[in-house]
Image (cartoon, rainbow, N blue to C red):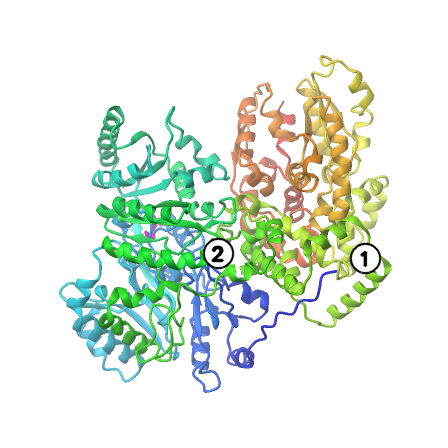
């Protein structure tokens, strides 16, 4: 039985009082002080961890004015704050032990667009790709690019002055900021934009904090102009913290205070709105993938590619490419990065051209390809081949792989993981190859592995050495390497922090700036934030302050992780390996990962959030001396006794009376998971929430009683066959309003599905009866056309017409289908954490299916969510005892068959099940090929989760989220194409459409049957 967990991290009384005062003052946002909520923002994509006292999630600028104004009162004047955007920082920029102001949940409104003047005004929580999706119909885009564009907020981009691919042409975020609205710590609103210097001097006379800020910035940036120009590197990536150089134009006639705020890492105030310039989308694009024999060759060839007038030049090394080959992304790009015969590809440069004129782009491409052909023929420059494409979807896929590089490196096997701490060095591009060779020699001298990728056109390369920070000696090595890299970048005229900000590397600021200029930074900080209350410790501290800067020696996640036993970490590696890259925060509603994160906008309800909760739960149980693995084994080996049951009753009563236990917070997050398993394949480091979720549920319910609905769901494979013997009676009872009300109130179950009438047995009789002895006695020739159909509980008992149609289709295609007897698969048990029972179910099913495997006959299944359990959960649970049987999905087998042509040329829309298309990314393409063989048309439609996910949508506590998920990406295409012309592969998805639209779409095989 798991212990009760009470983390000894009680909130400061003043934080509790501040939270209450906020509500009384009219704060409309969310206030979160639970341990789980705070833990969810205690990490980012860096190696650091800092637990805040509270998380405030404002809905608008007024909310931030309320909280900053309240913070000026004597009772709360000691409280400090840190703004937070997407939480994807690689150096802990937004981490704090104080109060987090998270602008990402609510402040996502695009406020205004002016196409004629080419600008847009947005709230700080708007996501970069969200903005570009809004701008696309107008023919524009927000140009600064970055690998985290599908979850990075505009506010975060402003605070880190973000840039990425294409920055030589499109610049950095600061180059596109026209105006900012920033709330200062004293509650004043500071509005900044470019103005004549005399106007800034006029504002400097204001007798308030805003006037003080103008006076200080004018003095620092004008009086020290010569030193600034001498000190600041002549780089495309001039990220320094406070951009003293670009506040003025060259002749000092114009002044823009926004340039100080852009790149300030939230240390000066709270940016709430931004006016941004927008760029026309180029009509023509071309991407060349240039392949090299060595990574050094790719680096040294970059200036040649830039000189060929490329818009951008990106690079990846062989380590990143090899990791990509094992990721879901590879199926989208493999035809564009084919191997070169008899040559090992060790580097790749991705060269993009953009233009408004097709002749212009073709001329540039032709000139470059002629030179590349010559180099290949002469075997010079290490160039071994290239491929090019003008297809925008293909180009987007290549960049999706490149953007995923950070996460892919996190999926490196072993305890040493490539980590971010010296990953954004910037040097003049002409120095890059020599710099990287020396950098590699430095890392090689320490015996480290590493991956490299980045923007060679701008002299920025992302280098992530592999370290195991749970080893204290390797943590010390991190400090040594950090110091060495700072010196190395200085040697080559560059910066250690060329793109991702300083964060915990702020300690190196004084050495870079020198005392005189660094003191000017401190004076500016003092003008904005005299008491060091806004993101303290980052960039610099206020002038005269004795507070310290954060350090690369700051507390790291590994300090907590090393408290978990090694064998437990290895067993729960799926949660421990999460590196915080945050791809699961992807805003795109048509992306399958992660539905609960999308619908709640709550970081706890994401794979990153759940992984963080799980690793902390494991740490706390270890502190209590609890052996998690031994307990799991015990729960699997024996049933509970009466004494344990009685103790569970008492524990559950205490729970309902409000007794605290951190396990309840973990449970809340796990219950919100739809168990769709999209994270298991879409997450770059393969954080598989459903797997560790089921283990947690089993452990949690060793202490607390299960709800009745768990038993209903977990036993559905055993009750459904019994209920199906009297389907009309059962359905009659279920249709009664009193039954529905009773089920909702007592069990928490809604919209209970009805059994099939007529039943499967009534529809097919004995025609496809299974006779094992006959099949065993038949010759191979006699069995040549035999196909075995594996039943699942959902289609057999709730959608019997689909099973019958599958059998008829097989027959129509000239095969002899045999319907196997129904045997539980175990998925419902696994989803609800009945792992002891699941193990038994899996053993029984595996024994039967392995017996059939000996017949060498095709085994087919209809529902992906069940079939994939045979491949994944059975393997993890049974190991070698799983056997070699293989149940194929219908389309996997059908794709290999010869199909007749039909005169029917109807075109259908295909909406695929999220579990299926993420685990098997070729699914939609396979169905498309099958339909094309027959002469039918099929168009895959990109959708996210439908919101049903097995029984998730039938649980009353999930009903609101279930319906909202359907509205996000399913209703529109269903209504656009019509139910009759929409084909849906998932049983859950078809059921959800029937529930919320009123009509049920067909499975693709049913459309084939009708057409043939």
Q: Which quadrant of the figure contains the C terminus? A: top right
Camera sees residue 249: no
Residue 430 pos. (x, y %):
22, 46
- Seen in the picture, residue 108 relative to 70 is either above or below; the reply is above
Element under disc 1? helix
Judge by depth and name the residue closer to the eye, 491 or 535.
491
Q: Which numbered dot is residue 329? A: none
Residue 200 pos. (x, y %):
21, 74
Q: Which residue is mark 2?
A: 469
Q: Residue at x 53, y 36 (%)?
A: 921
Residue 923 pos. (x, y %):
56, 34
Judge by depth and name the residue closer to the eye, 955 or 872.
872
Residue 900 image-quadrant placement: top right
In-image side of 500 versus 926 (left or right) = left
Total number of numbered labels? Answer: 2
Camera sees residue 10: yes
Q: Which quadrant of the figure contains the N terminus? A: bottom right
Element under disc 2? loop
Q: CA distance from mark 2 to mark 1?
A: 59 Å
Start-end of magenta stretch = 137-144
- Seen in the picture, residue 175 relative to 838 is either above or below; the reply is below
* In contact (CB < 8 Å): disc 2 and disc 1: no
The stretch drawn in magenta includes residue 494? no
Residue 779 image-quadrant placement: top right
Q: Which residue is mark 1?
A: 738
């Amino acid at each position: 039985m798991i212990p009760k967990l009470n983390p000894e991290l009680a909130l400061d009384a003043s934080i509790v009082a501040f939270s209450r005062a906020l509500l009384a003052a009219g704060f409309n946002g969310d206030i979160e002080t639970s341990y789980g909520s705070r833990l969810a923002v205690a990490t980012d994509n860096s190696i650091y961890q800092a637990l805040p006292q509270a998380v405030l999630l404002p809905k608008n600028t007024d909310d931030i004015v309320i909280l900053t104004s309240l913070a000026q009162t004597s009772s709360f004047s000691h409280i400090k704050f840190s703004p937070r955007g997407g939480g994807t920082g690689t150096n802990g920029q937004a981490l704090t032990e104080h109060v987090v102001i998270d602008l990402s949940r609510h402040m996502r409104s695009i406020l205004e667009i002016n196409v004629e003047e080419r600008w847009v005004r947005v709230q700080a929580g708007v996501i970069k790709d969200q903005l570009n999706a809004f701008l696309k119909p107008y023919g524009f885009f927000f140009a600064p690019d970055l690998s985290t564009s599908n979850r990075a907020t505009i506010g975060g981009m402003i605070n880190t002055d973000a840039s990425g691919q294409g920055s030589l042409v499109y610049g950095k975020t600061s180059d596109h900021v026209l105006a900012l609205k920033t709330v200062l710590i004293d509650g004043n609103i500071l509005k900044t934009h470019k103005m004549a210097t005399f106007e800034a001097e006029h504002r400097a006379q204001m007798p308030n904090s805003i006037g003080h800020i103008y006076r200080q910035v004018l003095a620092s940036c004008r009086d020290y102009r010569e030193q600034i120009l001498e000190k600041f590197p002549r780089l495309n990536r001039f990220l320094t913290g406070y951009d003293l150089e670009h506040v003025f134009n060259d002749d000092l006639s114009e002044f823009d205070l926004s340039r100080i705020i852009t790149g300030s890492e939230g240390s000066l105030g709270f940016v709430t709105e931004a006016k941004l310039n927008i760029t026309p989308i180029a009509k023509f694009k071309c991407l060349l993938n240039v392949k090299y024999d060595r990574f050094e060759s790719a680096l040294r060839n970059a200036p040649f590619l830039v000189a060929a007038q490329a818009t951008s030049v990106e690079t990846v090394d062989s380590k990143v490419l090899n990791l990509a080959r094992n990721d879901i992304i590879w199926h989208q790009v493999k035809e564009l990065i084919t191997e070169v015969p008899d040559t090992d590809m060790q580097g790749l440069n991705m060269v993009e051209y953009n233009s408004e004129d097709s002749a212009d782009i073709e001329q540039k491409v032709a000139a470059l390809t002629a030179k590349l052909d010559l180099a290949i023929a002469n075997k010079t420059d290490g160039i071994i081949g290239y491929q090019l494409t003008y297809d925008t979807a293909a180009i987007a896929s290549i960049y999706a792989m490149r953007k995923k590089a950070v996460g892919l490196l996190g999926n490196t096997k072993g305890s040493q993981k490539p980590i971010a701490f010296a990953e954004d060095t910037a040097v003049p591009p002409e120095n890059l190859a020599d710099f990287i060779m020396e950098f590699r020699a430095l890392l090689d001298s320490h015996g480290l592995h590493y991956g490299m990728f980045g923007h060679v056109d701008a002299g920025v390369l992302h280098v992530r050495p592999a370290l195991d920070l749970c080893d204290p000696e390797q943590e010390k090595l991190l400090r040594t390497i950090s110091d060495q890299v700072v010196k190395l970048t200085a040697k080559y005229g560059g910066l250690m922090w060329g793109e991702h900000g300083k964060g915990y590397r702020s300690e190196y600021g004084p050495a870079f700036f020198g005392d005189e200029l660094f003191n000017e930074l401190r004076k500016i900080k003092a003008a904005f934030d005299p008491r060091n209350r806004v993101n303290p410790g980052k960039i610099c501290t206020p002038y005269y302050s004795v507070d310290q800067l954060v350090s690369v020696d700051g507390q790291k996640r590994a300090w907590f992780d090393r408290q978990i036993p090694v064998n437990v970490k290895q067993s729960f590696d799926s949660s421990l390996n999460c590196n915080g890259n945050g791809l699961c925060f992807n805003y795109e509603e048509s992306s399958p990962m992660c539905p609960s994160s999308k619908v709640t906008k709550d970081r706890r309800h994401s794979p990153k959030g759940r992984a963080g909760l799980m690793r902390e739960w494991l740490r706390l149980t270890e502190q209590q001396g609890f052996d998690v693995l031994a307990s799991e084994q015990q729960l699997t080996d024996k049933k509970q006794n009466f004494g344990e049951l009685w103790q569970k009753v008492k524990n559950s009563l205490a729970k309902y009376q409000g007794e605290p236990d951190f396990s309840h917070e973990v449970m809340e997050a796990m219950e919100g998971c739809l168990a769709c398993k999209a994270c298991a394949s879409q997450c770059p480091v393969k954080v598989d929430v459903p797997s560790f979720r089921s283990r947690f549920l089993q452990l949690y319910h060793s202490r607390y009683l299960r709800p009745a609905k768990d038993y209903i769901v977990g036993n559905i494979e055993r009750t459904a066959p019994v209920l199906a013997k009297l389907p009309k009676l059962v359905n009659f009872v279920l249709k009664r309003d009193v039954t529905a009300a009773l089920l909702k109130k007592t069990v928490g179950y809604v919209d209970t599905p009805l059994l099939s009438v007529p039943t499967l047995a009534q529809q097919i009789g004995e025609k496809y009866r299974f006779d094992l002895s006959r099949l065993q006695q038949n010759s191979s020739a006699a069995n040549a056309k035999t196909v075995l159909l594996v039943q699942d509980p959902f289609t057999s008992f709730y959608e019997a017409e689909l099973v019958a149609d599958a059998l008829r289709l097989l027959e129509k295609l000239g095969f002899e289908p045999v319907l196997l007897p129904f045997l539980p698969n175990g998925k419902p048990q696994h989803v609800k954490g009945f792992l002891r029972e699941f193990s038994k179910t899996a053993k029984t099913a595996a024994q039967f299916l392995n017996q059939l495997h000996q017949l060498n006959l095709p085994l087919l299944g209809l529902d992906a969510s069940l079939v994939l359990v045979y491949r994944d959960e059975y393997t993890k649970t049974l190991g070698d005892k799983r056997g070699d049987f293989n149940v194929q999905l219908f389309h996997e087998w059908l794709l290999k068959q010869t199909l007749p042509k039909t005169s029917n040329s109807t075109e259908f829309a295909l909406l695929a099940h999220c579990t299926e298309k993420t685990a098997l990314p070729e699914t939609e393409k396979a169905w498309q090929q099958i339909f094309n063989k027959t002469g039918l048309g099929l168009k895959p439609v990109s959708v996210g989760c439908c919101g049903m996910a097995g029984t998730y949508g039938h649980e009353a506590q999930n009903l609101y989220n279930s319906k909202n998920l359907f509205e996000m990406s399913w209703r529109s295409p269903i209504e656009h194409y019509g139910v009759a012309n929409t084909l849906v592969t998932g049983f859950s998805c078809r059921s959800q459409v029937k529930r919320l639209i009123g009509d049920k779409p067909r499975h693709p095989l049913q459309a084939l049957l009708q057409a043939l």
